[in-house]
Image (cartoon, helix red, strand yellow):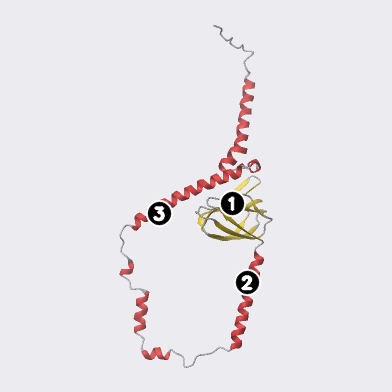
Amino acid sequence: MYNTDLPTRAELPSTGKLLRSTLMAVVIAVALLITVVLPAEYAIDPTGAGRLLGLTEMGEIKTQLAEEAELDQANDEAAAMQASQSSTPQESASDNQPTAANTAAQQASDVEPEQVASSVPDQEMVQPEASVALADALAAGEVASQATEEAATWGDEVSFTLTPGEGTEYKLTMEEGAVATFAWASDGGPLNFDTHGDGNGNSISYEKGRGVPEDEGELEAAFTGNHGWFFRNRNDNDVTVVLRVGGDYGELNKVL
């Protein structure tokens, strides 16, 4: 039987080589953590490499799904608690208090017939036809002016349809401090949404909602980058969404 010769001291790696190898392994592990693991798992992309590799979108979808699962669990617990509370018999306060209808009926019964008769005017005032036409014209002009002003408010409008379980993302290119107005509405069922932004290694979540049919307001950019909405359809049918934006922004782009 042949026994392997033990290495001599000269053949063993020096302490300096071991330290260099360990340091190199740590640097590689940190680089992979920042450029691959964080964007793909948690949508955290400090270098921007994850966005270029398409990993940040994967992390955003995973984060969105995890948050939706937490919201579903919280809603289920709230519904169960509400059901348990509603099963306890409670005495209605309306049984011991007079209703507004009963009070009104009692007051009406106390009015004398002479008072009712005196409250009716002797002669009805008839508005001239010219005044009616003038009022109609002013009302029509006001409606047309309001419609023109509303149309000028929006800079872009997009309409898209999401199949069951499908998600999409639209974002505005904005400078830091810029303010954009928005309004979106869904036809076919409510949506889950996440209003957020990213760019130059920064990321922020402005607002999240579950089962929301529409929303409107202002979006102020916390930093220069892309800011917008991620929508997901959790219904069993297709949902059509109309998104309108206006204000201070560069472009409206479909990201996902």
Residue 51 in picture, x, y percent from top left: 64, 43
Q: Nearer the viewer, residue 228 or 100?
A: 228
Residue type indicated by callout 3 = Ala
Using the image, determine if residue 229 lies above or below residue 132: above
Residue type indicated by callout 1 = Thr
Name the residue at the bottom extreme: 122
Q: Secondary structure at mark 3?
A: helix
The residue indicated by pointer 2 is: 146
The mark lying in front, picked from 3 and 1, is: 1
Which residue lies at the image location 58% right of the left edge and 41% below the top edge? Answer: 40
Q: CA distance from mark 3 to mark 2?
A: 43 Å
Side of 187 relative to 72 (left or right): right
Q: Residues within 10 Å of mark 3 (few under 14, many from 20)?
A: few
Which residue lies at the image location 35% right of the left edge and 77% below the top edge? Answer: 103
Side of 166 relative to 49 (left or right): left
| Label of residue 168 in the image | 1
Note whether residue 43 is visible: no
Name the residue at the top extreme: 1
The residue indicated by pointer 3 is: 79
Q: Are marks 3 and 2 in contact (CB under 8 Å)?
A: no
Q: Residues within 10 Å of mark 1 (few under 14, many from 20)?
A: some
Which residue lies at the image location 67% right of the left edge and 66% below the top edge? Answer: 152
Between disc 2 and disc 1, whose residue precedes?
2
